[in-house]
Image: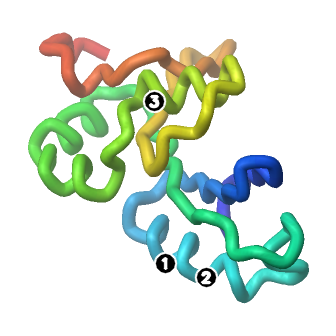
């Protein structure tokens, strides 16, 4: 099960979104086995990944400590992914989007909190 699949038929793109690093690549690779694939006609769409990370100390620390790993798997910037999801800008490719949860509301963050030194929340 994939947390979310975004399809842009015009751009010929399918983005699989997940909240777990461990399975994200395998789930994206398995998309062609889904019923109705490729969902946008006859052509093979470009497949990229979206990692949804909760903004907290543990996740920021993990991303900071494994910078090269995350940069290789998710090379597009969080800011570019945010713009694409909120303003319909072109999808930049595999990216991490950070999510802030405070018990009342959930919101996407515009940037990458792992790149800041603040680790208080």
| Residue at 61% across, 34% down | 90
Q: Quadrant of the C terminus?
A: top left
Residue 75 position within the rendered picture, expressed as x and y whole percent measured from the top left: 31, 46
Image quarter for residue 89? top right
Q: Is residue 73 left or right of residue 13?
A: left
38 is higher (above) or lower (below) than 21: below
Does residue 13 lie above or below 36 as drawn?
above
- Above-or-below relation of 85 to 121: below
**Picture disc at residue 55:** none
Q: Position of residue 4 (x, y in %)?
A: 70, 53
Q: How many marks?
A: 3
Mark seen at residue 30: 2
**Quick one: quadrant of the N terminus?**
bottom right
The 10 Å Cα crowd at callout 2, few under 14, some 14 to 19, many 20 or more, is few
- Residues at circles 1 and 2 in contact by the CB criterion of under 8 Å: yes
Q: Secondary structure at mark 1?
A: helix
Q: Residues within 10 Å of mark 1 (few under 14, many from 20)?
A: few
Nearest to viewer (mark 3 / mark 2): 2
Give the residue at mark 3: 98
Residue situated in front as seen by the camera: 40 or 29: 40
Which percent across, then down, holds residue 20? Answer: 46, 58
Task: Kindly identify the residue that appears in the image at 49 percent across and 18 percent down.
Answer: 109
Q: CA distance from mark 3 to mark 1?
A: 21 Å
What residue did someone put label 1 on?
Answer: 26
Judged from the image, the secondary structure of the residue bearing numbered disc 2 is loop
């Amino acid at each position: 099960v994939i947390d979310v699949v975004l399809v842009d038929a015009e751009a010929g793109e399918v983005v699989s979104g997940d909240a777990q690093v461990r399975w994200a690549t395998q789930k994206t690779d398995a998309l062609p086995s889904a019923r109705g694939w490729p969902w946008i006609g006859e052509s093979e769409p470009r497949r990229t990944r979206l990692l949804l990370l909760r903004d907290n100390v543990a996740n920021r620390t993990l991303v900071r400590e494994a910078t090269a790993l995350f940069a290789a798997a998710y090379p597009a910037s969080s800011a570019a992914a945010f713009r694409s999801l909120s303003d319909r800008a072109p999808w930049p490719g595999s990216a991490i989007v950070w999510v802030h949860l405070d018990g009342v509301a959930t919101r996407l963050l515009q940037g990458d909190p792992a790149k800041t030194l603040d680790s208080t929340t």
